[in-house]
Image (spheres, helix red, strand yellow):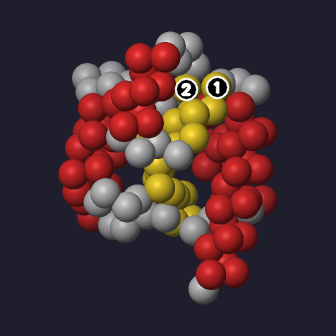
Amino acid sequence: MQILLVDDKKDILDTMGEILEVCHNHTVQGASSGKEALKWFKKKKYDLVVIDLALPVMNGVEVIARMRKLRPKTMIVVLTGIPCNDALREKLKNLDVQQIFSKPKGIQELLLYVKKVAASKHSAA
């Protein structure tokens, strides 16, 4: 799968990118800001976008809203360290975010989720 990984923390980008590429055989493009993420998103079609909400300049919700305008069907999940209240969850649901994972414990759940999505895409192909 083609995955766009968006996080302003370099260690998360590096570690997650490496795990997804080396252990799970996906192609990962990292982006450390919303602006960079949108640049990549416009250039290429991704099977999955994994995005943090706490990003510099443009927050994750804004980035997701812009991505939805460009490609409404792209699968987007959130991996974030900020607590999601009901209003934020509702906003993300309205933006068709498939799943919200909390750092750091959600990283394992996210990897299992990606594995499941990849398997379903593989069986659909």
**Label 1 is placed on what type of residue?**
Ser
Q: Is residue 10 visible?
A: no
**Label 2 is placed on what type of residue?**
Thr
Percent of width and height locating residue 92:
42, 33
Q: Distance between the residues labelled 2 and 1?
A: 5 Å
In this view, the residue in front, 35 or 95, is 95
From the image, which quarter does the C terminus lie in?
A: bottom right
- The relative height of residue 88 versus residue 61 in the rendered view (above or below) is above
- The relative height of residue 120 versus residue 67 in the rendered view (above or below) is below
Query: As drawn, which residue projects farthest toward the bottom?
Result: 125
Residue at which label 1 appears: 102
Say which residue appears at 37% left-offset and 67% top-offset.
Answer: 45
Q: How many labels does the image show?
A: 2
Q: How crowded is mark 1: few (under 14 residues within 10 Å), some or many (20 or more)?
A: some
Q: Is 29 positioned to the left or the right of 72 in the image?
A: right
- The relative height of residue 35 versus residue 120 in the rendered view (above or below) is above
Say which residue appears at 69% left-offset and 43% top-offset.
Answer: 110
In terms of secondary structure, where does tag 1 sit?
A: strand
In terms of secondary structure, where does tag 2 sit?
A: strand
Please report contact status of discs 2 and 1: CB closer than 8 Å, yes or no: yes
Residue at which label 2 appears: 80
Q: Is residue 46 visible?
A: yes
Say which residue appears at 50% left-offset and 13% top-offset.
Answer: 85
Q: Is 14 positioned to the left or the right of 109 in the image?
A: left
Say which residue appears at 25% left-offset and 23% top-offset.
Answer: 57
In this view, the residue in front, 102 or 30, is 102
Q: Quadrant of residue 87?
A: top left
Task: Pick whichever of labels 2 and 1 is earlier in the sequence.
Answer: 2
Disc marking residue 119: none
Percent of width and height locating residue 61:
34, 30
Q: Is 28 positioned to the left or the right of 35 in the image?
A: right
Percent of width and height locating residue 10:
53, 32
